[in-house]
Structure formats: C-alpha cells, structure tokens
Amino acid sequence: MNLFLAQSELKDLYEKVAGGARLDEAEALRLFESKDLNALGAIASLVSARKNGRRASYILNRYINYSNYCILSCQFCAFARKKRDADGMQLTVEEIAAKAREALAAGVTELHIVGGLHPSLPFSYYTDMLRALKAVDGRLQLKCFTAIEILHLAWLARKPARDTLLALREAGLDSLTGGGAEIFRKEIRSQIARGKESAEEYLDVHRLWHQLGGRSTCTMLYGHVESLADRVDHLRQLRALQDETRGFTGFVPLPYQPDNNDIPVKVAPTGFDSLRTIAVSRIYLDNFDHITAYWVGLGLKLAQVALSYGADDLHGTILEEHIFHMAGAPTPQSQSEAEMIKAIREAGRIPVQRDTFYQPVKVWSEETPLAAENAGASEILERNLASA
C-alpha cells in the first residue's frame, strides 16, 4: 500500500476493495464526499487494472441525429425543437444512408443514432432506416435509440415494448444507447425532465432488451441540481439491474452542460467533480467491465487524465455531435483516431480499437505505427471491420 493510502481517511475502503468485497451505499457516499482525490484514483485504478489491465479503448463511430423535433420539453435539453421552430431538422432515410456511406469511407464500425420524439413520423420510418443502413454494409453495428424513444416507438407501433424491440432487432438494431437515464431520483427527475419516462420505465426497457439477449450501455447526467446521495441512488439502481441481467456493456457518466436550457445552473461540473464521479463509479459499479470518459463533455485532456481515475474507454471519433454542443460544450465535433491513440499512449495505457460491445478490433502495441493517412477507403474499412 502506498504511504498516502496508508494515511488516508479512505484506507479501510481501499482494503475492502482490494480484498474483493462490495461497497454499500453509505460507503459510496463516503467516497463522493472525500476530498482525497489521489486516494480515490488509487482505489479506482486498482479496480480498473483488475478488470482491464493496461488497456484503454476507443471506437470509430459516427453520430447521426435523424431529427430534433420532439413532443417533450425537458428543461435541461438544448437540442429539441418544435415544428414551428425555424432551426428544426428531419433527415430522410436516404440522407441517413448517405451519411453511413460517408462514415464507412472513414472506417467507422458503429453508427450511434438518436433523435427527439418526433410528433408524426410513422414506425415504418425507423424500421426502414435500420434496414437501409444494414443494406449499406451488414457489418456496420447500429447502436440506436434511448429508452424513451423505445417507449415512443412502441406507442407508434401499437405494440408492447417487448414486441417493439423484437421488430427493431429484426430490422437490424444491434444495441440500445444508454442516453436518457439522467438522474433516477423522482424529485430530481421532475425538476430537469418533467414528462419524460420514469426511472422504472428506463430500467424496464433495458431489462426487456437484456432478456431478449441484447446489450446496451447506461448513463448518468451529473452536476446540475442533484445531490451526491442522488448519484449514489442512481448508481445503486444500475448495479442492481446489472446483477439481474448482466446486459450492460459499459457505464458513461455525462457531465451536465449548463448553456441554452432552463435549469438554473451557471457552471459546468469541475474537473475535480468529474474525476471523482468517474472514480466512484468505477469502484462502486463492481459488476461493470467498462467505464467511459466521455471526451465530448470532458474535453480530451481531462478524459485522458480520467484513465488514471478508473476510466478505461474514451468513447469514439463521433464525427458529428449535436446534443452536447447545442448545450454549450466547447469541445470539437470529432476526434481523429490518431488523437485518441496518442491520448491513450500518453496516459501510459495500451490503445485498443473496440466495437460496439467493447470487444477488441485492434490492439496497438507501443511500437505499432499508425496506418498511413493515404490508405484507401476500402483498405481502411477492411482493417477496421475485419473482426467486428
């Protein structure tokens, strides 16, 4: 044990985690309340190394938002628009397929697709979209829709949620996204996302998908009006569902972006808060294999530091992100593969290109040079999708 850990107020929790024991809610709250960020990082790094060694991953992906028209009016959302708004948008299936073809030329393996709860698009639009994208290339992994979108699509299809998920899977859906979890505590949820699905409904959609053999990620939006105890309660419910289904591939903490919305929060979460949230998540979510440092919200430099505080994944190249940027995120719209690999190597970790399910596509040794920038599109596609 390091000297600073031996003298830390968290020494007993380090010893408990090192012994393989599970922390309870009160202990997780102690971790959140501690100012000893070095000790938090040491405990989280212990768990991360036990699960993933020195590897840290990224994915070559593209975001596509098919529409920002939405029947809800969540207070924290700067993305949604009404039909009367001049800056609303809606893509045709062919426009989405064209974006997929462009993405394939850049070597992506995953499309991450979400949108607002559109007031008039039929259910067939969504199944047609999935089939069209699989027709572009059957190896392309489609990670689509939040839990509230699934409930909206079930209403459109006039089907139970289970049958809706089956229909979407038959059309080509590979994985659900984890968005929309926000904060589970009812009192907080009503302040930031009034009218959205309840925590129970969010968890039930993911439970159904897992029971059908599907996998998904999950999230938590932190740094707004919630308390530290609310965060622990949120993590507790995710851990309980993971105990039940083992269907979550990874957890993605999302730092709240304070601009252009109706929640009275002026300052985004600090670097300290983001690092401790990632660290506590890594320690407490002992049944999750992967914790993602979402560079879009953190910035790549802080996400890189988070690799020493329990994170083992930097998310993806993304190419085009709207939701966080419309809420004021100052980060770039995309990252190159070279920048992701560089950030991981600088943190002393081994870069791994992964697929949607966090399975390795390519492991980069410390000596492996990056692919030549002038590689042809077909060559890049074969390199990145060969084992996807």
Image (cartoon, rainbow, N blue to C red):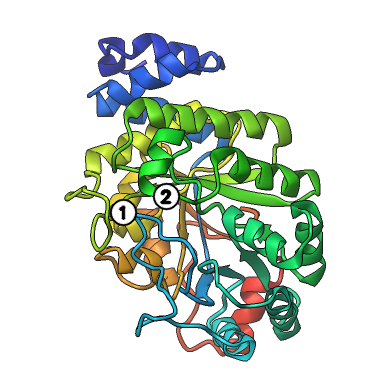
Q: In which quarter of the image is residue 191?
A: top left
- Within the image, what quadrant is residue 150 found in? bottom right
Residue 273 visible in the displayed image:
yes
Q: Nearer the viewer, residue 94 or 285?
A: 94
Give above or below for 54 relative to 337: above
User: What amino acid is labelled 2 in the image?
Assistant: Ala
Residue 188 coordinates in the image, percent (x, y): 38, 37
Residue 130 vs 197, above or below: the answer is: below
Side of 143 where 49 appears, left or right: left
Badge nearest the viewer, 1 or 2:
2
Please give the residue where the numbered disc 1 appears in the rendered image. Answer: 298
Q: In the visual, does 379 lie left or right of 79? A: right
Amino acid carrying label 1: it is Leu
Residue at the location (37% across, 20% down)? 29
Task: Specify the quadrant that holds the N terminus.
Answer: top left
Q: In this view, does 288 lie above or below 7?
A: below
Q: Mark 2 points at which residue?
A: 193
Q: Quadrant of the C terminus?
A: bottom right
